[in-house]
Image: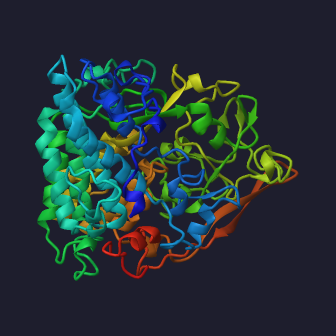
Amino acid sequence: MKKLVINLSLAFFMVLSISCKKVLEDHPLNINKESDIWDQYDATGTNAQAWVIKIYSQLPNGFIRLNGMELDCAAGDGVPSNRANAVWNVINGGYNSINTFDDNWANCYSAIRRANIFLNNYKRVPWSDPTLPKWLVAEVRTLRAYFYYEMIRRYGGVPLLGEKVYNPDDPALLQLKRSSFAACVDYIVSELDAVKDQLRPDASLANRGSGNGVAEGTDNDAGRMRPTIAMAIKAKVLLLAASPLFNPSATPALDFTGYPSFDANRWKAAADAMKAIMDLNMFALEPNRYVLNTTHVNKEFVFMRYAASYQITWGNQASPVGYTVGNVVSGGIVSPTQELVDAFPMANGKAIADPTSGYNLANPYANRDPRLSQTVFYNGATWLRRPVQTYEGGLDKPNNTNIAGGVQTQTGYYQKKFLAQDDNNTAFTPTMYHPSGLSTFCLIRYADILLNYAEAQNEFAGPDATVYAAVNAVRQRAGLNPFAAPTGLSKEQMRGLIQNECRLEFAFEERRFYDIRRWKIAKEVYGTGSLHGVSIVKNADGSLTYTPITVATPFFNANNMYLLPIANNEILANPNIAQNPNY
């Protein structure tokens, strides 16, 4: 439990900039005592605002945050190109309460504690603008709700602190127990409902961007908590609560693992929450999916956070190893699996296993769902004015320990997601993506809302016209032709189609790992069988020979791995914190 309580060391808090937008400017917190934060002479609340910005900076950033790797590499859609990367241990099932994985407990409680400190002290500031503290309070409560959501999707029910700020030596701290999953959901939803109308107003659809991937939107408050973000977080929480992992729990005697019995109305609540956002007409799918890589403010982003330098954060990490990024040899760190590649249908919407699809084993990447080339670098794909070469001995699979430290694709593929369509450029520069050179990581976008609505509505009422409309909107934007999903699908068939659409649309966006758990299909789709790639040989006549290869055999124990373990040191510090089952 020691990590739950973070000592207040103000000298340490040099606030990180989380935005290149002027509204989220970097407020340097160069102070040495708490009273300076709640400065009675600071009518603008500069230091208090900096405290809030620090909470924003703790939002998750999906770029290589996991041992220098992406979370999807622990979900079957990729593997680390570097065989020494710690995520291989996760793939092999080597995590437990001693050796944790994606442990966000300490970060979330640190952010929640900071939120509570603000809520307990903000009135000490002589705010000259009475609207600003009202907005900030609502933002902080929304942030706090989101951090609880991050925890319950990992662990189930967790201790709810209210607005209490515990001192490290407070004996009550060691009496805290896990709240039920239901209580956590109810608390998060009630908080979001309470503050929604207290947040600063949303930008109009027109102010969110041009949709052409060039002109930035004019929303100067982008990144701040807004009413639609509160609504979207609520909808995601309700979707989680409705999902098979928690509705019902496999261990009903343990109330922190989910609900004791199934209730179909939980799906209806999730569908209604998603539909409420759709009905606002404040978001839209960007016609050009690359706009999601090249702008910070656009029509599709509902909830995003600003990250660090694009070149450092992603450009020289992801590019195939035969490219040079800023005079640095590319890392090519993620190797997408054949399973992910094969999940993309043909451009006509038919699965490649369908004998009428037109799939050609000798030319396997031709006429595929356009999202494949936007997500994965495959052999022959064009980038920076040359074809990617992942055949054996090619520029991007040189089989040479002197190139990139010997790291190269394990599967014959590299990740392209988050990199722009730079076919006509000769070299990578961060400003090709955004003039600031900074990246954004989107936590919720409008495609989420559409597909999550389709999922919840299908589970509650079956594949009605509104389900088809939501799914088809995403497929149409993807470029499928015809884009319409097959008519006459059963609920189960539509469920499978929606789950695959989520896999393709949100590949490498930190969705798949948690989706296959909340759907309770991880054992089936990830923990049974092997993951594959392809070895490509370029023959003397220029033809290519494709040979399937096995790259990993993941281990997944359905008795415990649907939830993550709470770190053992938390349990030792406070035995009242019950561990998740079978850890």
- Percent from the top left, x then y, of residue 150? 34, 54
Q: Is residue 354 visible?
A: yes
Image quarter hosting the N terminus: bottom left
Could you tell whether 512 is left or right of 141 in the image? right
* Among the 4 quarters of the image, the one containing residue 211: top left
Frontmost residue, 352 versus 281: 281
Label total for image: 0
Frontmost residue, 68 versus 501: 68
Image quarter hosting the C terminus: bottom left
Image position of 368 with respect to 553: above or below: above
Could you tell whether 222 is left or right of 488 in the image? right
Could you tell whether 296 is left or right of 204 in the image? right
* Among the 4 quarters of the image, the one containing residue 302: top left
Q: Is residue 567 visible?
A: no
- Percent from the top left, x then y, of residue 549? 69, 67
Image position of 9 with respect to 345: above or below: above
Frontmost residue, 325 versus 16: 16
* Among the 4 quarters of the image, the one containing residue 213: top left
The residue shown at (16%, 77%) is 261
The residue shown at (29%, 60%) is 170
- Percent from the top left, x then y, of residue 28? 44, 25
Q: How is the image coloured?
A: rainbow
- Percent from the top left, x then y, of residue 490? 24, 67
